[in-house]
Image: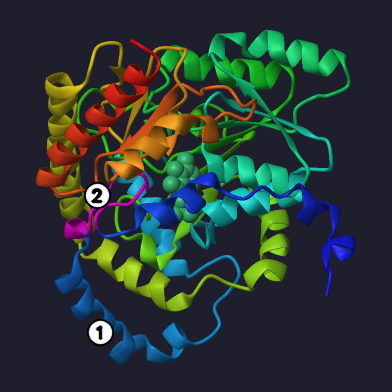
Amino acid sequence: MDIKPLLSNNALSMRRSQIRDLLSVATRPEIISFAGGFPNPDTFPLEELKEIVQEVLEKDGNAALQYGSTDGVISLRQEISKLYKREENLDIPVDHIQITTASQQALDLISRIFINPGDVVVCGLPSYLGALQAFWSYQGQPYGLRHNNGLDEACNVLCATGKKPKFLYSIPDFQNPSGETMTLEEREYVVEVARKYDLLIVEDTPYKNIRFSGEKLPSMYSMAPERVMMLGTFSKTFVPGFRLGWIVAEPTILDRINVAKQSADLCTPAFSQLVAAKYLASGAYDENLKKTCALYKRKKDLMVKSFEEYMPEGVKWTNPEGGLFLFLKLPKKYDTRELFDIAIKENVAFVIGEAFHSDGSGKNTMRLNFSFATDEKIVEGVKRLANAIRQLYAKYGN
Ligand SMILES: Cc1ncc(COP(=O)(O)O)c(C=O)c1O
């Protein structure tokens, strides 16, 4: 049956993730993949979780296996509130926290309640592909900004042409994919512009607590809680398999989110929420996160050192103070899509930077993940990638 004529306009405006498609090639065992945003499984606290799972089933089995409330298990929301107090000295009441089926669902629900067809959402150039996909799914139009300092002018022009943005989407800490972190002044400026044009901000913070060096900076939520929806997730700091995330926002916003979530999945599984709550309460989360940061710092340093050793001239890379990614740039005339095909033949994979640029730019860029591969594979994979880049250069007579 031909279903195309039956598809909704929303379905037709959805875009397939190039990352997921590329990942299907990158899973071949001979390929060293720097493509996915995967945490390292060595950081998963398997032994502790075995005990906690047993305890939850013995003491709380009925609640764990039953439907839960849409807003989330209270003990987990309390633990998240305590986490903000410990980590950022923020007082967040439990009724300002909505549990979501990880932060990808938060992006979907926010898009669902705010975006009408044609609505503009201001985001970075580059920006997280999964967020762009959520905006496109509801026929939103991402408006990519390369530099934050152009925000005031962009909003001015958009408002003057009847395209006032529905919200600003930002990943202020160790951005995916660029690894960049917004300075305090940039955060204050974005909040000021949001106030000037009366805009909402979606502050997406999956990497905030994966910091290797430098000072933690205040969230935009702490500066303007009335207009910021702050997204959190346990995917990068704990385990992605539990699919646990949350939104911190005003109850008036969360009430709408809650109704949207009811038709999406009724509730996030109570089982994983109860296990996570117990794990956080035990104090092991904070300890484990320290080890995770130390491991990722070592891997990031190793990848940067390998770049210095093996990369041909003209390749530039970031050296972020945290997160999971390095962002590389080739000289302007090269296309990393072409490089990708050569790299796959060399048995190494990455994500082409163009996938993160809503305007189709960034063709000479690419994202590499350093958290997942073993140390040996990091060095070997960089050698292979450097070799692939040399082949690309040679093709164009460089
Ligand atoms: C910026 C950003 N937001 C959201 C997500 C989604 O994460 P999850 O749904 O696992 O919480 C990711 C995952 O890589 C991300 O990088």
Q: Quadrant of residue 207?
A: top left
Q: Which quarter of the picture shows residue 46?
A: bottom left
Which marked residue is nearer to the observer: mark 2 or mark 1? 2
Judging depth in this view, the residue of 15 and 1 nearest the camera is 1
Q: Position of residue 232 (x, y in %)?
A: 45, 48
Numbered range of the magenta stretch: 30-43
| Colour scheme of the picture | rainbow
| Mark 2: few/some/many CA within 10 Å (<14, 14-19, 20+) | many
Seen from the viewer's position, the closer of residues 53 and 4 is 4
Q: In this view, does 85 lie above or below 360?
A: below
Q: In the image, what residue occupies the spot 64% across and 52% down?
A: 108
- Decide whether the magenta segment is chiefly helix, strand or loop: loop
Please name the residue shown 30% across and 25% down the image: 391
Measured as percent of width and height from the top left, residue 378 is found at 17, 40
| Left or right: 275 in relation to 138 | left
Amino acid, disc 2: Phe
Residue 89 in view in this figure? no
Position of residue 92 in the picture relative to residue 344 (left or right):
right
From the viewer's perspective, is residue 102 above or below residue 294? Answer: below
Identified at 88% across, 65% down, the residue is: 6
Instruction: Kindly identify which residue carries mark 1.
Output: 55
User: Which structural element holds mark 2?
Assistant: loop
Q: Is residue 9 something one can see in this rendering?
A: yes
Mark 1 residue CB less than 8 A from any atom of ligand 1: no
Question: In the rendered image, which residue does mark 2 sit on?
Answer: 372
Q: Residue at x 10, y 45 (%)?
A: 376
Q: Nearer the N terminus, badge 2 or badge 1?
A: 1
How far across and down, in percent of the image, does residue 122 sit?
A: 66, 27
Image quarter hosting the C terminus: top left
Q: Magenta includes 209? A: no
Disc 1 secondary structure class: helix
Residues at marks 2 and 1, CA–CA distance in whole angstroms: 30 Å
